[in-house]
Each structure stands twice: as structure tokens, then as C-alpha cells.
Amino acid sequence: MAELTQRFGTLVDIYSQAVRNFADRPVFGTKTGDHWHWITYREFGEMIDQIRGGLASLGVGRGDRVAIISNNRVEWAVIAGATYMLGATVVPMYETQLDKDWKYIIGDCSAKVLFVADEEIADRVEVFGDSFPTLEHVVVIDAGSDYEGLTYAQLLERGSARPAPVADVGRDDLADIIYTSGTTGNPKGVLLTHANLADNVSAELAVVPVTGDDRTLSFLPWAHSFGQTLELHGILAVGASMGIAESAAKIAENLMEVRPTLLIAVPRIFNRVYDGVNALMAEEGGLKKKLFDAALANEYRRMEMAEAGRTSPWVEAKHALFDRLVFSKIRERFGGRLAFAASGSAALSPEVNKFVDALGIVVLQGYGLSETSPLATVNPPEKRKVGSVGPAVPGVRIELDHVATADPNDGEIIIYGHCVMKGYHNLPEENEAVFTEDGGLRTGDIGHLDEDGYLYITGRVKEQYKLENGKYVVPAPIEEHVRLSPFIANIMIYGVNRPHNVALIVPDFDTLEKWAEKEGIDTSDRKRLIGDERVRDLFGLEIEAHSEGIKSYERVRDFFLIEEDFTQENGILSQTLKVKRREVMKRYGSDLESLYR
């Protein structure tokens, strides 16, 4: 395990030093109309001081919980900084979360103060009534002049008149409770200390080459540890700056305006780049397409030679030419300055990774969980291995439990070190299950280490998986829900590291054939029957009708119908009648993958 050099003791150190050392540098940019307005670190610090005073006037102090329901915005960062400096704990939530999740989290964390983005969210929270005995104040950030409740602007005024000192915050003090979607049931609160997060930032900066001259575009939610630690805290730690994206729909436009030098992103963003550039080149056709193909082939050749420790003057000369004629023009679509990006939260396809690299944007793929603050591994820029998630960052150790997988090569990934959470909030049984006796965190992920200590993720111990956007999916409850359709005999959902879920479906042929006969569809050949467009339309409607209550990202977006049922006799069902997913993938994996093309 490489030793970690601690650059910061707590998040308070990061925020205080940033304001003091980088006072006149820009930190946050926001767009109003057609204009981007940037504030400095000094202005950011003044806002933190004011909100800290305002929160103190509400009685917030050490150990209290301050919850936030808001997308990324300057006020979010100000509230977080002020909360940390009072020794209190930040509990972030998403604007897009279900109301029932808000209700559970606010109650479970015992929030004392709740900040909400606007009056509409405040009204939805008000419906919860007296469900929260600890909640004393709801503060609206964007409030109209006629709003009668407490507002962010009023809290700024209070703080200006009643400043509050910075608390003596310790490394073991709780900084965040970040609620994950979990597997089933309610979200799980991940307890992260100041040591967890500050050391994770130190580890990030020991590997990822971020400097004060860098600028990023912020679009990953700070309610997730990936966006919060690596982007928000990491950028502040070095005095860099970030423009805050207007919305997901405006990311492409905002990239051109902000002109970032780095991005913290998830695989979906890079997949869009891959799909978008290839679609553009196919549409252009002719000489442009041929030139692009030649440039890409030369870049792939250059990568292969670099991996082998070789160079070629001819390949390098063509690289310089193609970069000027082809790749630089593509990079202009990202503002023209983007040099590298960090990818995490789900696995990035090696093909997409190489493609984006070829454009001249170095992608550093890493790995971690909310439970690991989140960064546990990352590919170092000077020695990347495409397809891996890199070696452990300084201060972190990776071990594999082969007993859990019964596989001599791949084992369950267990993480040790500064990044490992304190535990789950109010969930002693979950804590007992997730921690090893010597303090390691069982990730539930399966992988292997190569001879250089680089980690490769290969699956999950359990059936739970991540979509490419990092959202967890547990297929069994969704399958049970959709299987309620009278037309469906068996179903298996798939979507590991893909943009959405698809399904392999065995029709209930008795029901289907009766329906088909009424519709005048030939039922003499089952293969022809399930290929009929009218049958496909029927199953599309059935899936939609039986998806009520299923989260949007969990829903099945496409499907493949098969004749073969799931049985013990054909080896697809176990002795306990559970579907052997690996067996299904061996037989039908290519069919499911074809649904993404």
C-alpha cells in the first residue's frame, strides 16, 4: 500500500485554505440569460461566513444535521462549507428523488434544518406534516418576494449581523451522511467523516493532475460522493474553478462556453461522445469520413506502439497532421481546451475509452463506492491500462476474497484504508454484514488484480448491478412486477453497465396464442409468431402497463422474445427454481446485447 501524504486534516481545512490562498481567483460560474457570472474565492468565503452565522442563529452546532434538497448551485457549496465549519453534518438529497425517499431520509438522519431549492419543493415537504420531531426550520433558496417562510436571503442577512466562530472540527467528526439507493427498501445512510473525505481528496490529488489553472463544468450531482468529493472538494483544494451546468440538456452548449480543461464524468457522457462523433462522421461521409477513419487508425496504431514502448517518426508525423486537421476540430465541440477527464461510478467500455483517448482527451478511469468516499482506485495518467480501473490510490489497500466467489482468479473486492466509511446510519445488521473482522469493506463487486496491482471489475457477488449512469438496479423485484402480465411466463432483465435495462422474455404461449387467433395472426409457427410486429407491440404495452411504481431508470426499454422456457431440465433453473443468470447469458447474451445496437 502506497503511503498517503495528508494535505488536509478536515474539509474545514480545505475550505478555509481555499478562501485564504486563492482569494482573487474565480471559483464558481453560473449563467443568467446569455451571460456567465463568476464569483471569487473571497466572495465565496464571505457567503460561507454569513450562512454560518445564520445557521448558528438557528441553533445549529456540533453534531446537528443540515439537509439539502437541491441541484448543484453556488448556494449548495456555501451551505456545505458553513455546515462543516459549525461541526454539523451535511445530508444531501436530489431534487429528482421520490417524496417518500425525502421523507425517510429527513426522519432517519434527524435533520434540524432543511434547505430546499424552491417553493414547490417546500410545499411537497410540508405535506409530510409533523413527521419529523427534530426538524425546526425549512429554508427556501429561490423564494418569491411574497413567500412567508424563512429564506436563504434572510439567513444571509442574519449571519451578517450575527457572525459565528468556526468550530474546532476533528477528523473523526461526521461530515456527510450520503444516502444510497441501496438494494431494496429504504435508502441507506453512509456515514463519512472529515478524515474520510479530506484524505480522499489528498489521494485524488496525488494521482490526478489537477491544478489551480484548471476549469471544469459541473454536472454530476454533489448529492453523490463522486461529484461531491472529486469535483467540489477537489476543485476547491487546488484553487481551480467550475462552471455549473444549467441543465443536462444544456451540457453541450455550456461546454462550448465554459471551455473546461478537465471533466469529472460518468461513462454515459463518454458513450454519448462516442455515439455522437461516429454518427456525425457517418452523416458527413465522403472525404471527411475517410480522413477521420485514417486519423483514428493512426491514433490506435500510435497507442499500440506506446504500450509496447516504441515510437515511429512516420506515425508521430501523421498524428500531428491528423490532430490539426481532424481531432482538434472535434475537441472544439468541448470548448477546445479539454485535456483529460476522470470517469467513475460505473465501468467504461474499453472501446469507448480508447476512442475518446484518440480524440486527444485522456480518460482516467477509477473505481469506488459511496461507502469508500468514493475513490479507491484510479489509473495514473503516466501508466494507464485501458479496461482496468487502476491500482489502489495512496493509503488504500485492495484484497480479494475468493471464498465469496469460489473462483481462483476473481474474488470479491475488499477495500481497506482511509476511504472506508464509518458505517451505515442506524443499520447495525448491515454494518455487521459489510465489514470484515479486520475492518475491510466488502464491496459486493467481483474482480481480479494483475501483476502490477491494477484492478479489473468483472461482476457482482449478488445480482445487483449498475447501469452506466451509476444507478443500482436489483432485477428480481422488477422481474416479479412485470411477470404479473398474463402474457409473460418468464423474464430476465439485463443492463450491466448499459444505458438502460432490456429483457429476455418467454411468452405464456397459451395466453398469447388465444389473443393472436382473435387478432387473425397465424399461430402455427411460434418463431414466426414472436417475430410478428403486432406481437411485439403487445408486449411493449404489457411491459408499460406492469411497470407502475418502478423507477424510470429501472424500466425495461427493449426486449427479446424466445421460444425456450426456463426449466430445470435445460439447466436454466436451479434446484430451488432460481434463474441461473450466467447460463442465460451464455445462451442469449448476444441477443440481449443486440438490443443496444
Image: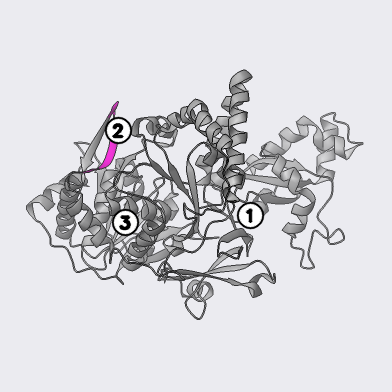
Is 3 located above or below residue 466 in the figure?
A: below
Kind of residue at badge 1: Pro
- The kind of secondary structure element at disc 3 is strand
Kind of residue at badge 2: Lys
- The kind of secondary structure element at disc 1 is helix
Q: Position of residue 48 (x, y in %)?
A: 19, 52
Q: Position of residue 313 (x, y in %)?
A: 55, 37
Q: Is residue 397 magenta?
A: no
Q: Tell me the tag on residue 67.
A: 3
Q: Position of residue 91 (x, y in %)?
A: 34, 58
Kind of residue at badge 3: Ala
Q: Residue furthest top?
A: 286
What crowding class fits label 1: few (fewer than 14 Cα within 10 Å), some (14-19), or many (20 or more)? some
Q: Earlier in the sequence, mark 3 or mark 2?
A: 2
Is 329 located above or below residue 195 in the figure?
A: above
Q: Looking at the picture, tell me which residue is in the foreground, 446 or 53.
A: 446
Q: Earlier in the sequence, mark 1 or mark 2?
A: 2
Q: Are marks 3 and 2 in contact (CB under 8 Å)?
A: no
| Residue at the image point whose x is 54% and y is 47% from the top | 551
Q: Write the start and end of the magenta stretch as one range.
A: 25-35
How many numbered dots are placed on residues in this image?
A: 3
Q: Tell me the tag on residue 475.
A: 1
